[in-house]
Structures are given as C-alpha cells and as structure tokens.
Image (cartoon, coloured by chain):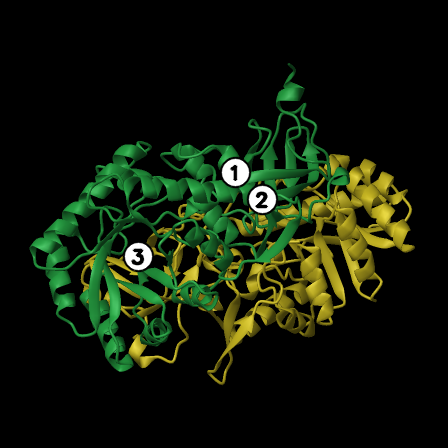
Chain colours: A green, B yellow
C-alpha cells in the first residue's frame, strides 16, 4: 500500500457531486437518530430524566425529536432561545443560566404564563431578589434551580455555601426552589481529565451530597441535575442524581471523540469545504477559516491534544493547522491527490460553536436529499 | 486615590441605563466617521486608491459611506457578500478570494453583467481555466487580479513563479489580468512583527518589484493592491503601489491597539455584557462567552501578548481570562465595585470575527439613539 493510497484525497470531486456550495454544514439525520436513541437509552438504564441542552442544534424540530424519544424537556442558555422553542410548541424548558435583567425576567414571566413549565436558574441573592420581584409583578410563582459550582468556577455557589443561600431564596415570595444543577465537564480532583467515568461519578456524588445537605436543612429539593455529553451517562449511575443535560451528543464532534465517548462515525455534523488553492505540494487552502470553524477549542488544548482545528474525513494524516477568517490551511502529504475544486468533509473540534457560526445547516435524510434548514435559535444573543 | 477607584466598575448600572439587552455590540457612528476620514486621508496623502475590505462591517450602508469619503470601491471575501453589496448599489467590487466553483463563477458572470465593475482573484492555472470557461459561457470578459504570496503562505503564487503563471493566464480567452494583490499582515523578514512601518514598507517593495517583473515579461499590470489595517498607510508610501485594502480600521479593535495603529478611544465597536454572577470577590461572570467574543485572536498571541480576550473599558486591571460558550470569566480586583446586573463594555481582541457572531449591531449616532441594524452580509457562507 503506497503513501498515495494512505494519504489520498478524502474529498469528493466537485464535478461528480450534487453537493451544495461551500462552506456549509451537512447533518446526517440517521446519525442524529442514533445519537438521540443512545442517550435516551443511557438515561432510561439509570432511571434518570433526560433534558438535552439545545445549544448545539438550536432547532425546535430536533428538540421535538429528543422529547419524542423520551426526553422530559429541554435545556437552553438564553431566554430568547426559550422563546423560540416555546413558539414551536416545546412546553418544558430549563434556562440553565442566571437571568438578572428586569426586562428579560418580565419576558420570562410572560413565557411561564403561557403554560410552559419554565425553570429558571439562580446562583446569588441579588439574582433571587430580581426573580422574586419579577414574580410579584407578574402575580405568579417562578420555578427555579440553584446552581452549584462543583469545580468549574464560573457561575454557581460553592457546595458549602449552598444551604445558607438556598434557605434565603426559599424564604422569598414568588420563587419555588425545586432543584439544584451543575455543569462541570470532564474534571477529576479539580483538574481536566480523560477518565470521564471517574469524572462523571465524582460529579454525581458531589451533587447527590449537596442535595442531601439541602434536604437536611429542610429544603424540598426534587431535581438534581448534572451532566455534560462526556460525563452524563456516568453521573446518572450515582444514586440521588435525577436528571442529565447533555447537549453535544446530538451531533458529536472531534472533542468528544477525544474523550472516547463516540467514534468519528457517530459524528453527525461535518463542515464541507472546497480546495481553492494548492500553492505547494504539502499545502492546500480551503474556503473555511475562523468564520466557518469554531476556534474555542484550540489545537493542542489539554487534555485532548487535538492536532489541528478539525478531523479531515478520509485522511487522518492531513492537519488543518492554520486559519484566517476565510482561509483554512491544511498540511497534506506531498504525494496526495488533492486538486483545486475538490470538496472535503471535516469534523470540527467543537460542533456547538461551529454551528453557531452558520445561518443554516443542510439536513440529509435517508432519501439522500439535502434540506436547507435555517437555524431558528441561532444568534439569539439577547 | 484608592484601589477601589482605580479598579472600580467600568460599567453602567442597569437601573440607570436605557441600554439594550445584552450581550450586544454597540457601534459609535462618530468614531466610525473619524476612522473613515483618517484612512481616506492616508490614501490621498500617498496618492493611492482605497478599496476597504467590507469583511469587518458587512454593511452596505457603511460601504457606501467609505465610497462617499473617497474610496474607489470595496473588497469582499465571498461572492455572496458581493451580491449583497451590489444589490445595495455598490458598483465596484473586488472579491479578494479565489472562486473555483463553476456554479459560483456562473453567478459572478451574472453579477459582472449587471454593470458592476467586478474584479475576481486567481492564483492557479486550474482556477484561471475555470474563470476562462465561465467567461466563455457568459460571452464576456472577466477582470482578474493575480494573488501574490508575500510570506503569509496561504493562497497566492510565489513572486518568482508569478510571471510564468501570469503569462499563461493572460493567454487565456475571457480573462483580463489587470493587477496583482497580496495580503500579508504585519510581517518582517518572514516573521510577525510589531514594527509595522518596516513591515508595510517591505510589503510595498515586494509588490512593486513583483509588478515590475510582470511588466518586464510584457504584461499590462495596472493595479498593485496591498495592505492590511496596520500596514496600509506605510505600504502606500512605496512607489508602485496603487491601492490599499484595509478592513478592520472601520471599527478598530484591541489587536490594532496592540499594533499601535490606534488608541482604545478610536475603537468604534464595543461588546456590552451584563454581570450575572460574582461568585467570589475576585471573579465576575458576564453573559458573553465564545459565542459572543471571537477566539481566533488568542490571549498571549504573539507578538501582541494581549492579556485576556478583550479590553474592559474603564478597568485596565480586569482580565477576561476564560470563556465558555455563554460565560465570560473576568478576574477583578477584590475591592472593586462590580455587582450583579452591572453592564460592562469590552473592546474585543478581533472585531471582524466578533461582529460575525452577531445578527445585528446597535448603531449609535450623535442623536444618542441606538438603531438596531441587521448585519446584511453576515453569515453569507456560500
């Protein structure tokens, strides 16, 4: 077997394809269905509820499929995303992000008044007071979960401070504190890890323990919500965890392959680009750069040691090693067959932020047709 | 003066403001006008044409202002951007990117048939043949410029190979090779540099020399087009350079401040965020992360040594040191006054890719009103 065969062109000749213009994202519907079923089974096996984070796909129709497959509801990061989802009939939504703007909280009250089970997030006394005021103004009660900082040190209250804060919040009018939640990613003993089984178990244990402490303090904590795509299935195995909130699993990406939670073949989203230049034997330039591929998971980002900004399908020796806004520079074997006009499919390092760069995806179903699908909740920055 | 005053809250209390919901970008129209005038004057001083790159603003109305202030035309990176600009009446457009898709070239021919001076880019024989075929099919001649690789090693032909390729392209039917162009950024002797004056002069000299060599070979090279925001004014000083194509200058950003080409006060675009949590004395979390701020210019990116992902206006000690998709973690002085609900303005490291994450900007004019302005050519990925 020659190097030429090993390092050959992983793309499809433009001439032979009916592919859309590039750059674009193509989503494989069959793989999405497999990913939906797999996570639903993992949740059912552990007897926990599944509330997928919609941040990855931002598509109400995909959220509906997740719910049809057994998910209890969905998670979003923004009020505006919740509004888009509710407008499409999704009626059980957790906004896993502290909302502290009075105007947004007024909109949240309106949303909760529409028959949606809307759960808000709170992690501070100031935030809780704003929630309480909004609830009072709306003449209603708002359901909320307290965010626990289990080590990521972003939003959330430390476990040892949780009971004191929760009691104060619980005493406020208009807030029903129904649960706790955390986001932690793959972390063990305070450090990033590739041992996601141990990370998930630790995450689950910390949250089960936090829930026990709050109940001991007299609080009625029903929901104990955890989990990222890598850790969700493992955290779910811990007694006391009641819900998982993975997001990325819907499409999967190279970062998740790096965590070992899926194979490249499970990745449902690929970015297609075209070779626009081969300025030297070992370099091709494609029409996707940092406005097409997310750069928030960097090459060589520990602990994954991802080489380059994506995985070039069919050519594991090729490395997307540099990007400008619209140029992607791929280092290739000198004897590989890439030509100007060839199209290449690339699994991005981080699919969530990559999808967020695009106005639409092409959705491929078993009929082989590509449907141009606007990303309804994309760019909902407010 | 106490630390409290030094490191105090650079934001505006939510209660006292009529600001839009966050995260959002606010563009200061007066600063944009100053930036437009400044670059127009630099071009006029050196007697070169100005063809701003619209990749930064992606707004036809801003392109029109640049042209009204003396720009010859505009530059874009994508055919779809050119189409949006032409639809708004911009009639002199250079697509500084090799287009190699037959379907796109067919659209380019249609665009050129509409009375637009459309200039295409070419850097390979294969690409030129595709241009020639499209021109023949459209029964017209296409104007093109040859891209020269002056050291960035992305698209472009090396100077020593330019004449041979240019002669072959010139011999093809349907292509009028009217000029050469390059993009180089701040580079000196093959390395990144902060000596942008020397970098700009080197860039100009290389291109003037390349143009001479092509003319010596018998080619009619009229346009010698160079320049990024940092180098444009310096490259323009070199005899033989005829055009500059800066883009970022329209808004400016922290990277350009790092290059010394402007002050923070010249930065017309700021990202506004809200403090959603202060989990510890030295940490605030704001509602903008990697889906709000571009990450393609990294903290500590040489040679700028930018600390953090943006410059927090009014608090030079605060550092936006970590981001997740929707969380920005800002390290602050323990005695500073930030509170949940405060709004903060941040100058991003790279405004071009940051604007590209947003669906709209708020445009502030001297009447003090903020106008929500959809970014017409955003996300034109095809």
Counting residues from the N terminus, which is met first, the one under dot 1 or under dot 2?
2
Query: Mark 1 to mark 3: distance in Å?
Result: 29 Å
Query: Mark 2 to mark 3: distance in Å?
Result: 32 Å
Judge whether B158 appears above or below A183 on screen. Answer: above
Which residue appears farthest toward the bottom when viewing the image?
B367
- Graded by Cα atoms within 10 Å as few (under 14), some (14 to 19) or many (20 or more), the crowding at tag 3 reads many
The residue beneath circle 2 is A271
Across and down, in percent, residue A43 comes to 33, 43
Labels 1 & 2 near each other (Cβ < 8 A): yes
Across and down, in percent, residue B51 comes to 69, 62
A110 horizontally vs A274: left or right: left
The residue beneath circle 1 is A310
**At 33% across and 76% down in the image, what residue appears?**
A106
The residue beneath circle 3 is B330
The chain letter under disc 1 is A
B230 horizontally vs A19: left or right: left
Q: Secondary structure at mark 1?
A: strand
Q: Quadrant of residue B35?
A: bottom right
B305 horizontally vs A345: left or right: left
């Amino acid at each position: 077997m020659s190097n030429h065969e090993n390092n050959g062109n992983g793309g499809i000749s433009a001439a032979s394809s009916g592919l859309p213009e590039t750059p674009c994202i193509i989503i494989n519907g069959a793989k999405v269905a497999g990913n939906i079923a797999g996570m639903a089974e993992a949740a059912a096996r552990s007897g926990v509820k599944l509330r997928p984070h919609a941040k990855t796909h931002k598509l109400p129709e995909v959220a509906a499929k997740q719910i049809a497959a057994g998910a209890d509801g969905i998670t979003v990061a923004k009020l505006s995303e919740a509004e888009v989802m509710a407008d499409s009939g999704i009626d059980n939504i957790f906004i896993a992000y502290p909302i502290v703007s009075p105007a947004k909280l007024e909109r949240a009250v309106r949303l909760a008044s529409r028959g949606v089970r809307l759960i808000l997030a709170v992690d501070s006394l100031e935030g809780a007071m704003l929630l309480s005021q909004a609830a009072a103004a709306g003449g209603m009660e708002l359901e909320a979960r307290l965010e626990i900082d289990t080590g990521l040190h972003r939003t959330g209250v430390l476990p040892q401070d949780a009971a004191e804060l929760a009691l104060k919040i619980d005493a406020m009018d208009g807030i029903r504190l129904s649960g706790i939640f955390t986001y932690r990613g793959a972390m063990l003993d305070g450090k990033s890890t590739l041992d996601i089984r141990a990370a998930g178990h630790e995450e689950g244990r910390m949250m089960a323990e936090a829930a026990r402490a709050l109940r001991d303090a007299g609080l009625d904590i029903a929901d104990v919500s955890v989990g990222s795509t890598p850790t969700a299935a493992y955290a779910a195995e811990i007694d006391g965890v009641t819900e998982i909130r993975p997001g990325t699993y819907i499409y999967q990406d190279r970062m998740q392959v790096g965590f070992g939670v899926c194979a490249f073949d499970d990745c449902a989203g690929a970015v297609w680009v075209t070779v626009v230049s081969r300025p030297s034997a070992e370099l091709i330039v494609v029409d996707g750069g940092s406005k097409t591929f997310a750069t928030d998971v960097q090459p060589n980002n520990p602990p994954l040691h991802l080489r380059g900004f994506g995985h070039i399908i069919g050519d594991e020796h090729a490395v997307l090693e540099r990007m400008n806004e619209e140029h992607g520079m791929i280092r290739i074997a000198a004897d590989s067959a890439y030509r100007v006009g060839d199209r290449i499919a690339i699994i991005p390092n981080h699919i969530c932020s990559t999808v967020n760069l695009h106005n639409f995806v092409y959705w491929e179903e078993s009929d082989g047709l590509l449907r141009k699908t606007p990303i309804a909740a994309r760019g909902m920055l407010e």
